[in-house]
Image (cartoon, rainbow, N blue to C red):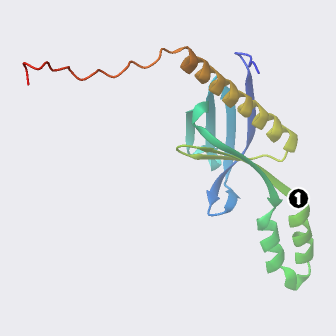
């Protein structure tokens, strides 16, 4: 599977954090962009107070996870407002409005982005997997073409007169 050298794909959304077994969205904006053999991550916090940009080699990506779940903040607002009977609407909305996320586990960090478009998440995931496969195939070509390791030196042979 050959990859075009100027192949670039990008996904934008809301950044997130992995807390225990739960994925939580945080305020701000995030973009993941696949540039050559690097994954470029740009994160901007709420009101633009903090900005960060990270370049991660594609070979450092360990796992790619996609997920979908209910909107928990709507659920808890619904539980709190059940006494007013409006809570039922919030609880129903919590299960109807789905959150979709993409988590990229690397050797150093977890990159989380929330995006409502399931197809866009899948396209980005396919592009990242393709980049990982092409990186691995180029590694195997280099290792195949490399020379065999040198043979270890032999111990010196002692003659009878040296003993």
Residue situated in front as seen by the camera: 57 or 48: 57
Q: Quadrant of the N terminus?
A: top right
Q: Please, is residue 13 above or below residue 153 in the view? A: below
Q: Is residue 66 left or right of residue 154?
A: right
Estimate the x, y position of residue 115 in percent, counting from the top left.
79, 46
Along the viewing direction, whichever of 160 and 16 lies nearer the viewer: 160
- Residue 110 picture location, percent across and down: 60, 48
- Does residue 39 lie above or below 16 as drawn? above
Q: Is residue 47 left or right of residue 146?
A: right
Q: Residue 120, percent across and down? A: 83, 38
- The crowding category of the residue bearing disc 1, from other C-alpha atoms within 10 Å (few below 14, some 14 to 19, many at least 20), is few
The quarter of the displayed image where residue 2 is located: top right
Q: Quadrant of the C terminus?
A: top left
Q: Secondary structure at mark 1?
A: loop
Residue found at the far front of this picture: 160
Q: Toward the viewer: 116 or 18?
A: 18
Which residue lies at the image location 33% right of the left edge and 22% below the top edge? 152
Q: Residue at x 7, y 18 (%)?
A: 161
Which residue is at the far bottom?
83
Quarter occupied by residue 74: bottom right
Q: Position of residue 124 (x, y in %)?
A: 77, 35
Residue 64 appears left or right of 117: left
Q: Which residue is mark 1?
A: 97
How many numbered marks, from 0 up? 1
Query: Residue 26 is drawn in which quadrant?
Result: bottom right
| Left or right side of 81 for 105 | left
Identify the residue at image location x=47%, y=17%.
148
């Amino acid at each position: 599977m050959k990859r075009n050298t100027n192949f670039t794909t990008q996904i934008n959304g809301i950044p997130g954090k992995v807390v225990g077994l739960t994925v939580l969205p945080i305020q701000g904006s995030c973009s993941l962009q696949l540039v050559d053999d690097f994954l470029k991550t740009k994160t901007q916090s709420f009101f633009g107070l903090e900005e960060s940009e990270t370049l991660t080699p594609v070979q450092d990506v360990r796992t790619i996870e996609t997920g979908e779940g209910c909107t928990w903040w709507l659920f808890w607002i619904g539980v709190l407002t059940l006494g007013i009977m409006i809570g039922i609407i919030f609880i129903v909305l919590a299960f109807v409005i789905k959150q979709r996320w993409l988590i990229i586990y690397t050797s150093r960090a977890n990159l989380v982005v929330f995006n409502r478009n399931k197809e866009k998440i899948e396209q980005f995931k396919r592009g990242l997997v393709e980049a990982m496969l092409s990186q691995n195939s180029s590694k195997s070509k280099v290792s195949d073409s490399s020379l065999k390791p040198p043979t270890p030196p032999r111990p010196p042979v002692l003659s009878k007169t040296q003993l």
